Image (spheres, coloured by chain):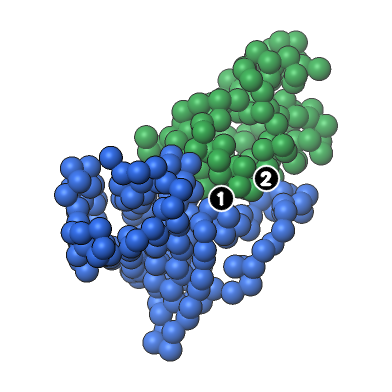
Amino acid sequence: METWNQNLDELIALRLRAYRKGRLAGSGDSDTEPSLYALDMPARTDALLPLSGFVIAAARRAGLSPRDTAFVEVAIYEACLNVIEHAYRFDASRRFRVDLIEEGDQLTFRVIDSGLALDPSVLGDPGEIDGNTRRAGRGLGFRIIRRAMDSVSYETGGSGENCLTLCKSLREAPIRG
Amino acid sequence: MSTFTAKMETRKSPRPIRVVTLSGRLDAAGLPVLQECLNSIRPEKDLRVLFDLNELGFVGSAGIGLFLSFVEEVREAGGDARFINIPESILSILSLLNVLEFLTRSESAQEAIEELSV
């Protein structure tokens, strides 16, 4: 597993080029071994743009359709923004990690922070958006995450780490070229 | 496509219609730009607004929330809004939330202007 901890833009650009050339294999050069990547992210909203570029490249390489790629992009964006806004309350000195695991017919992202834990109730089904929610204009992030991904789970560990795991099936994705 | 911009112009046919053209990424950085743009027309009564999303590359939950709250407010005040040229990727996200019916779409700017002129 590789860790990127400096010059995020440059490293992601480098990795994106590798993705486009089909050379990014991580620890999984064969179809049977999982590919593992870990991005060490600063808790800054401006870091989310290069992260989105990475997520899009990873989703496309995994064979996801444009629609599912858009779903994964927005879900990871919302998960990371939640860490910055709520777990770390915009403390830009904090860091969090995004893991990408491509294994078998599944793409898995893990967003790991050491800030304030989520209220697990946000992962429940909030139902349809009503007039009150529209007027408030808030509380949509986890609705998007839940519906955009095939499964979402959350764990808080004794070490103070929180881990949000988001999975997307590749089963119905087009065959890789 | 990264920097978010919101450009607004007014069409007078036959009643004033605010045409808001959005481009770039409507993310945490872009949100204040759209808020400022919409705040400038919020006090108007019987507001008619046409959003053109043709150049919008991404919208996060806060951006969608702003669309919802603004349109709700405008309609409660007797006005209305239409959306045109929503990119496929953003349509998919709006479909996830089942808000496409509320954020009424028109096929073209001309059609939207006719509907908003009623």
In the image, which disc is placed on residue B21?
A: none
Residue A161 % position (x, y):
41, 80
Q: Quadrant of residue A44?
A: bottom left
The kind of residue tagged 2 is Asn
Residue farthest toward the top in the current orientation of the protein = B13
Instruction: Tell me which residue sits at (45%, 61%) in the image.
Output: A167
Q: Which residue is mark 2?
A: B98
- Please determine whether, in this image, residue B108 is positioned above or below residue A171: above
Left or right for B77, reference A92 = right
The kind of residue tagged 1 is Ser
Chain B colour is: green
Q: Which residue is mark 1?
A: B61
Left or right for A141, reference B74 = left
Residue at mark 2 to residue at mark 1: CA–CA distance: 13 Å
Instruction: Tell me which residue sits at (34%, 61%) in the image.
Output: A104
Choose between B55 and A101: the one closer to the eye.
Answer: A101
**Circle 1 sits in a helix, a strand or a loop, which is it?**
helix
Choose between B109 and A154: the one closer to the eye.
Answer: A154
Q: In terms of sequence position, does the residue under pointer 2 or pointer 1 come before the other?
A: 1
Work out which quarter of the rendered image holds the C terminus of chain A and state it.
top left
Residue B86 % position (x, y):
56, 30
Chain A colour is: blue
Q: Inspect this view and state whether residue A53 appears.
A: no
